[in-house]
Image (cartoon, grey):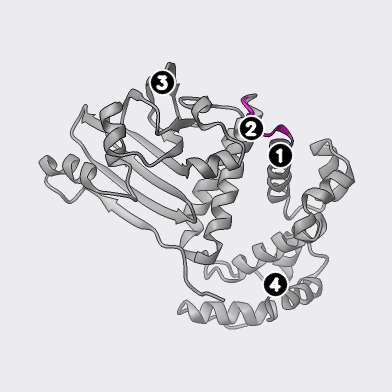
Amino acid sequence: MSTGKLVLHRFSTGLLPPRDRHEAFVNRDWPNLGPVYRSAPTEPFDTASESLGLGAIGVQYGFVTGARWTRDEEVMRSYDPDAMTAAVTLAGGSHGIMGERSFRTRPGSVHLVDLSAPADFIAMASRVMIVVVPRGVAEDTGLDVRALHGTVLESGTSAMLAPHLIGLREAALELAADDAPRLGRTILDLIALAVAASGRETGQPIEMRQRTTMMMARHEIEQALGSPALSVQNLCRRLQISRTTLHRLFEEEGGVSAYIRGRRLEAARLMLADPDNAEAIYYIAERLGFSDAAHLSRLFRERFGLSPRDYRVMSLEAQGYSRKG
């Protein structure tokens, strides 16, 4: 099994002379969206970003000062990544035209863009998280990239994307590179869920409904991971689906109960590997919905090949820490 970790690619113009910053941004290739638009700063330019490659999907976390951004025929001929972006605004905002659609973004919104279509907009200094998805990958998921160009999503469902991306950034350096494609698919599923919930569902309705229900189920499970109220019965009631439908959704995971157990064990593993977490194993077991420490220990050993205590010691020693008891 590979032990490689995800890599964050960092870029900043902060140490460059102010007159050189915009040019450095524009001329830097991926991971960077500088060449995608013709940009004209509306204030002294500065930017900083961190990028993750997750299989075919890229994610960029960044800050950029105010500018006007244009994507016209000339720019599209010179640089065409044949992709869509989903930009989550954390601070700041923008307004303008995408194709024939006018739009306005603000903190919390998700903005969908077809990079093969024209755009002209003004953005204030903003913090954004941008997901870049190849067109073929997006369309295989049932997203009509061209029809969604310029769409701004602001539903409660689209709000699930921001904390997921933030959590991914915080955990990135602990995650295995082998998991990158699966992490990318999860992000794409969340985007598809937000589109479907907005009433703009396109592509294959049955598949999209299944993806939507699956993502809602996973979200409910994550929110209630340590709660004794997390049960098949309660999930079915909250999702308004039958037990048969729920089990079918998680068939590849060995069933919904197996999926919940796996997520709880993974949460326990991360807690045990955290040098700042000194909680006793029995308390971790209680917090994550296991009947007792022995129950957690038995399942943990079956899954990871070590007892929780031995895993904690091994993990902390590998990170250069030691802990008695």
CA gap, disc 4 and disc 2: 47 Å
Q: Which numbered dot is residue 207? A: 1
- Asked whether the viewer can see residue 71, the reply is no
Which residue position holds label 4?
281
Residue in view at x 41 percent, y 62 percent: 7
Does 320 sit above or below residue 159? Answer: below
Residue 161's quadrant in the figure? top right
Residue in view at x 11 percent, y 46 percent: 17
Query: What is the x, y in percent for residue 98?
Result: 40, 22
Label 3: state its secondary structure. loop
Dots 2, 1 in contact, CB < 8 A: yes
> What kind of residue is marked 2?
Gly
Q: Give the range drawn in magenta.
A: 200-205
CA gap, disc 4 and disc 3: 56 Å
> What kind of residue is marked 4?
Ile
Which residue is more in the foreground, 163 or 213?
Answer: 213
CA gap, disc 2 and disc 1: 9 Å
Which residue position holds label 3?
99
CA gap, disc 1 and disc 4: 41 Å
Which residue is more in the foreground, 324 or 180?
Answer: 180
- Mark 4 surroundings: few (<14), some (14-19) or many (≥20) residues within 10 A: many
Does 306 sit above or below residue 88? Answer: below
Query: What is the x, y in percent for residue 167?
Result: 53, 51
Query: What is the x, y in percent for residue 20?
Result: 13, 43
Considering only order in the chain, which callout, 3 or 4, is on the residue closer to the N terminus? 3
Dots 1, 3 in contact, CB < 8 A: no
CA gap, disc 1 and disc 3: 28 Å
Dots 4, 3 in contact, CB < 8 A: no
